[in-house]
Amino acid sequence: MGGAGFGHGASCACHSAPARRLCARIDSGLSRRAVLKGVAASLAAPSLGRVSPAFAEAAPKPILIRNVRVFDGVAPKLIEGQGVLVEGARIKAFVAAAETVADAEVIDGGGRVLTPGLIDAHWHSILAAIPKLAAITADIPYVHLVAAQEAERTVLRGFTTVRDVGGPSFALKRAIDEGRIAGPRIYPSGAMLSQTSGHGDFRMRSDLPRTAQSDLSLAERAGISAIADGEAEVLRRVREQLLLGASQIKIMGGGGVASDYDPIDALQFTEAEMKAAVAAASDWGTYVCVHTYTAAGVRRALAAGVRSIEHGQLADEDAVARMAEAGAWWSIQPFLNDEDANVYASPLQRRQQAEIAEGTARAIELGRRRQVKMALGTDILFSPTGTASQGRQLAKFARWLGAAETLRALTSGNAELAGLSGPRNPYPGPLGRIAPGAYADLLLFDGDPLQDIALIGDPDRTLKLILKDGRVHKNTLAA
């Protein structure tokens, strides 16, 4: 995790004292009684937002969305004169304007633009929206209820899929997949793997030294992180996350700006340890992604076979060239020193934050020049107000990529990265596309995001229709 803005690294709140206290509260509150109380409360609660109360039920008959212009997730040109037929959770076919479909519910798009649902390639479902004060003081079931509420808001912002790169989101994913609550598809990593003193080591100084008789840390027992030193421990921790249902594995390969103990230039995990993680994931047909900022961290991860670099704003030309040669993905975030950046009191943190902000623009330019496969994500954390900026922050990439390429990256591009999970892919159908057989995750915009990508940052106004899995989550066309 890392970054300026509301995320990690340049604003990495996951290493702050409130974060550690949150982990401690999650652990201490996860008694059988607390969990049962939380489950009961969540099942008894009414809809937390504006999702249709019938969303949990599949549509009783096909849905034909007609009179729309279609962005298929790939081509930069809109498809004209074709409607989209949805049957169950999938797109059945394109339908010519003059054709009719018997027994289909018809939705008239009024000439608006239909796109695939958006995908955030770097998200933390459990930790994105819980405010620090609430995390410190609230009952633990409340933390999980907040995560469920934010999941609903996430899909209402048009993000129908997220790649979760750290946190115990398995239960939330299950509840969403079963139709019990509204939310995006979740590709879960589970606990973030960290070495001792690494970016996922949330222990206090008083918790050291660790011995064979020591209990696991609070954060580990809560499923936030997993500390592993040596190849054998790395193998064990990776396999534990795979047992729980991880679709990919997240390891910490370097430090962050807001970290208490690990400096941003520190290399974390030896190449042999990283190779152990890659081997364990590969045995299950999936891949490893790594948190790192520096060129040295990128090179070590690539040498070990890591498939996705998370952040990497301080990579140099050589490291980027190696990414391109390896065919690795670069999952990058809009960490800019702007209105969305966190405020730091420490001069050192402010200097590092500025360095990463400068590196963001340089990294995108290097990635484009070397034709590296780039995925886009936000990494928002501990910010109930910041989550509302999800689309607005991702729209900033259009400064370098243009609107059409940014929208392609946020749909079919990010879907391709998620698909690296191979047989561990919880959603094996085509994502991020409008095509026969693809999942029916669809957005109808009042305006053309291929021309004005800022539309994705104002979903309350611009999104008139949201379908996920063929279920209507929002429809204000008649309003």
Image (tube, rainbow, N blue to C red):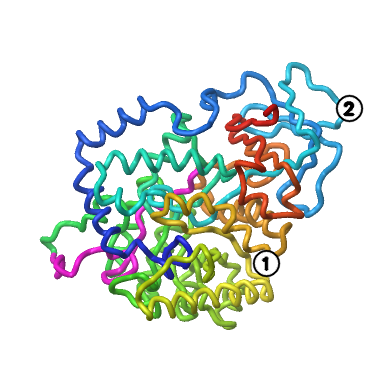
Quarter of the image that includes the C terminus: top right
**Residue 215: quadrant of the picture:** bottom left
Q: Which residue is mark 1?
A: 399
Q: Residue 412 at what x, y percent from top left?
A: 66, 51
Residue at 31% over, 29% down:
41
Q: Callout 2 environment at 10 Å: few (<14), some (14 to 19), or many (20+)? A: few
The quarter of the rendered structure image containing the N terminus is bottom left
Front-lying residue, 345 or 416: 345
Q: Is residue 108 above or below residue 211?
A: above
The extreme top residue here reads: 103
Q: Which residues are magenta?
A: 185-211
- Left or right placement of residue 433 versus residue 235 in this view: right
Q: CA distance from mark 2 to mark 1?
A: 39 Å
Residue 98: give its label. 2
Q: Confirm whether the magenta stretch covers residue 189.
A: yes
**Residue 248 visible somewhere in the drawing:** yes
Which residue is found at the position 39% from the left and 76% from the top?
Answer: 349
Check the image and name the residue furthest to the left.
213
The image quarter containing residue 236 is bottom left
Query: Is any atom of residue 332 visible in this view?
Result: no
Q: Nearer the viewer, residue 400 or 477?
A: 477
Element under disc 2:
loop
Magenta stretch mostly in which secondary structure?
loop
Would you call the spot at circle 1 few (<14 residues within 10 Å), some (14-19), or many (20 or more)?
Answer: few
